[in-house]
Amino acid sequence: MKPTTIYRKIIHIDMDAFFASVEQRDQPALRGKPVIVGGSPNGRGVVSTASYEARKFGVHSAMPCAQAARLCPHGIFVKGRFEAYKEASRQIREIFHDYTDLVEPLSLDEAYLDVTENHKGMKSATLIAKEILERIYSTTQLTASAGVSYCKFIAKVASDINKPNGLTLITPEEAQTFLEELDIKKFYGVGKATQKKMHSLGIKTGADLKKWTELDLIKAFGKSGRHYYHIVRGIDNREVKAHRTRKSYGKERTFSDDKEDLNWIASFLDELSESISEGMKKIQAAGKTITLKVRYKNFDTITRSQSLPNYTNRTEDIAEVVRQLLEQTDVGTRKVRLLGISVSNLNLSEEHYYQQLELEFNKSLSSSPAL
């Protein structure tokens, strides 16, 4: 007699056009209109979220706002109000935690929940998901969609099937057929470049992918090949993690016009270093690796990094390293459209984690205690 397989009960909740829906909720005049949250159509910003009315014209997130304006001439561009979005997200997460402590937020508008064991003692994950969607709407007047399955990958794909305001269940028995019929672009980890390569190899659906051996996939796609081999067979053992470790902290800015004045750029980076330092101190984080990101006028993007011997979140340390990294770029001879700084290799702790960096001074100077 074969042992009974015990499956997890995973829900993926994804808010529907979240930022745009908040704007339509708070401004009745925007309801039913093509709302585009992001930058100005006359500037260089990108779309954060587009309402479903705008999506009909081909507008999507991360698209340049100027392009969105061409696709949807009657689109209403709205500047984001992140405090409003964060407040709505807080209300939604409170609802999640009424059912389980195993909540893994992916962003403000989506999360995984493991409800195998839950606070309500409910046996049906589908009924839990239905109840959560109803409570989200009654609390926030916003709609969400849910996917329910035995693993994270299938639950996430399922949540996108009946959007907006939909709920889709994929049982373990249905999983193989579902994955074989799935378009390859829907598979976790398959971006545009990988999709193009797969199409060139005749892989357009899960069924096509399943014909390949693990060894051949590794030869074609490197380490990712092993992932594709398992995922098309519904093998995804990733747990829902309630506490995700932050890996980096950073900020970047796209300029409304190209910058080439080196003094202005250096001053901007000093201010950005200070802003990052303040933000890191608020979350009690320090890091060892500092990275400068530069995007030139023609969209060429480069990064330069340097690691320190000790953790730091001090403005002076970050700014000093960034100045050194700036010398390794073509800034000053090529126009720049974006600059960013990030600090990684983080240590998040209540402790006072950074140590004073050792600098060599003239030995004839008298020593003074460290600040």
Image (cartoon, rainbow, N blue to C red):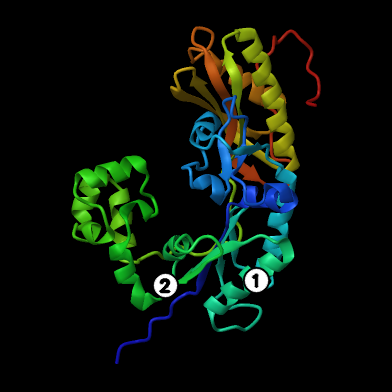
Name the quadrant of the N terminus.
bottom left
Q: Is residue 301 left or right of residue 86?
A: left
**Label 2: which residue?**
170
Q: Amino acid at mark 1?
A: Glu
Note whether residue 120 is visible: yes
Badge 1 marks a residue whose secondary structure is helix
**Label 1: which residue?**
134
Note whether residue 349 is visible: no
- Going from N to C along the chain, the mark reached first, 1 or 2, is 1
In the image, residue 102 sits, relative to residue 34, either above or below, namely below
Using a 10 Å C-alpha cutoff, classify the residue at mark 1 as few (fewer than 14 neighbours), some (14 to 19) or many (20 or more).
some
Determine whether label 1 and label 2 are within 8 Å by CB. no
Residue 202 at x, y percent in the picture: 19, 50
Q: Is residue 349 left or right of residue 34?
A: right
Name the quadrant of the C terminus.
top right
In the image, residue 38 sits, relative to residue 371, either above or below, namely below
Residue 296 at x, y percent in the picture: 49, 18
Badge 2 marks a residue whose secondary structure is loop
Residue 364 at x, y percent in the picture: 74, 7
Q: Amino acid at mark 2?
A: Ile
Report the front residue among 78 and 249.
78
Q: What residue is rendered at 72% in x and 26% in y?
A: 274
Using a 10 Å C-alpha cutoff, classify the residue at mark 2 as few (fewer than 14 neighbours), some (14 to 19) or many (20 or more).
some
For residue 310, which quarter of the picture?
A: top right
Q: Is residue 298 left or right of residue 243?
A: left
Residue 249 at x, y percent in the picture: 62, 38
In the image, residue 282 sits, relative to residue 10, either above or below, namely above
